[in-house]
Image (spheres, rainbow, N blue to C red):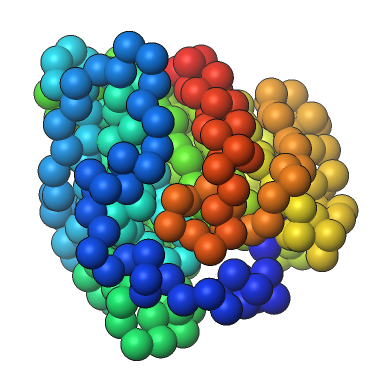
Amino acid sequence: MCDADTDADNARISRRDFALGASAASMAALLPSPANARPVTGRAVTIETPDGPAQAFYAAPASGRHPAILVWPDIMGLRPAFEGMATRLAESGYAVLAVNQFHRSTKTPFTALPDARAKAMEWRKAITPEATTRDALAFMRWLDGQKEVDAKRAVGSTGYCMGGPMTFLTAVARPDRVRGIASFHGAGLATDSPDSPHRLVPRMKARALIAVAQNDDARAPTDKDKVRAAFAAAKRPAEVEVYPANHGWCPPDSPAYDRAQAERAWDRQLVLLKTL
């Protein structure tokens, strides 16, 4: 599910035009608000991690306490599109933190940099499973300290492309708290590596939504079966489905954005998060 070839397919259209001049508000305007949307507030934050400060965007309803959601962006990192998506999710009643997982190497957004994607692929090498776990624990501790977060409720985590496996690591880092994960066109969920995400399933207590891109599935048609089998063997509920859309179809600034299928995946995400 997702490989270098698939990423290259979508990289042929420059993201620079999507990134320049964009804002969280303008990206949110592209996304329909839910019925009875809650008033929300959003702000840029900096979170201390064991590996240094990390940029993030935090959005939450303006009143009350709510379940926390940790969002891992795709290969192009934290940017207005993900700030808009976080804001929209907060409108449905969640305290949402979208993070810069590249914080060891760069600040965000970096989409307008020359050779941004090539740089991101290099920066990605520093984001090991151990590093992601340290980040996830730091981000969840920060969330639990926010007045809008109900720390007695379960936590959810969503991830896109390279963020997909990060939701699995998040669930394993705090199985007592993380009870729902969603991966959208996730990268490398079923590999031959001993630490492949699908091998982590027995260590988690989360239910899952695994939304697979059709071109990822065409390249690795047995991956979804391995993921589905892992959840079945662990007796963990999981919805694993191939969507009729290509890799990167969910973020509204993606050249592969498919509004109809993105909305369908979004609705399934809300169904999952209601179980928290």
Position above or below: 73 against 94: below
Residue 77 in picture, x, y percent from top left: 37, 63
Hey, which residue is sitting farthest bottom in the picture?
Answer: 114
**Quadrant placement of the C terminus:** top left
Is 49 in front, or is 181? Answer: 181
Residue 139 position by quadrant: top left
Position above or below: 182 against 161: above
Query: Would you say 147 lies left or right of 54 here?
Result: left
For the image, the number of numbered tags is 0
Residue 90 visible, this angle: yes
Query: Would you say 80 lies left or right of 121 here?
Result: left
Residue 188 in picture, x, y percent from top left: 66, 60
Is 238 in front, or is 108? Answer: 108
Q: Which residue is depicted at the point 67% across and 62% down? A: 2
Residue 228 in picture, x, y percent from top left: 78, 38
Residue 20 in picture, x, y percent from top left: 27, 69
Query: Would you say 243 lies left or right of 249 here?
Result: right
**Quadrant placement of the N terminus:** bottom right
Q: Which residue is depicted at the point 47% across and 41% down? A: 158
Residue 220 visible, this angle: no
Q: Which residue is depicted at the point 67% across and 69% down? A: 6
Query: Would you say 126 lies left or right of 210 here?
Result: left
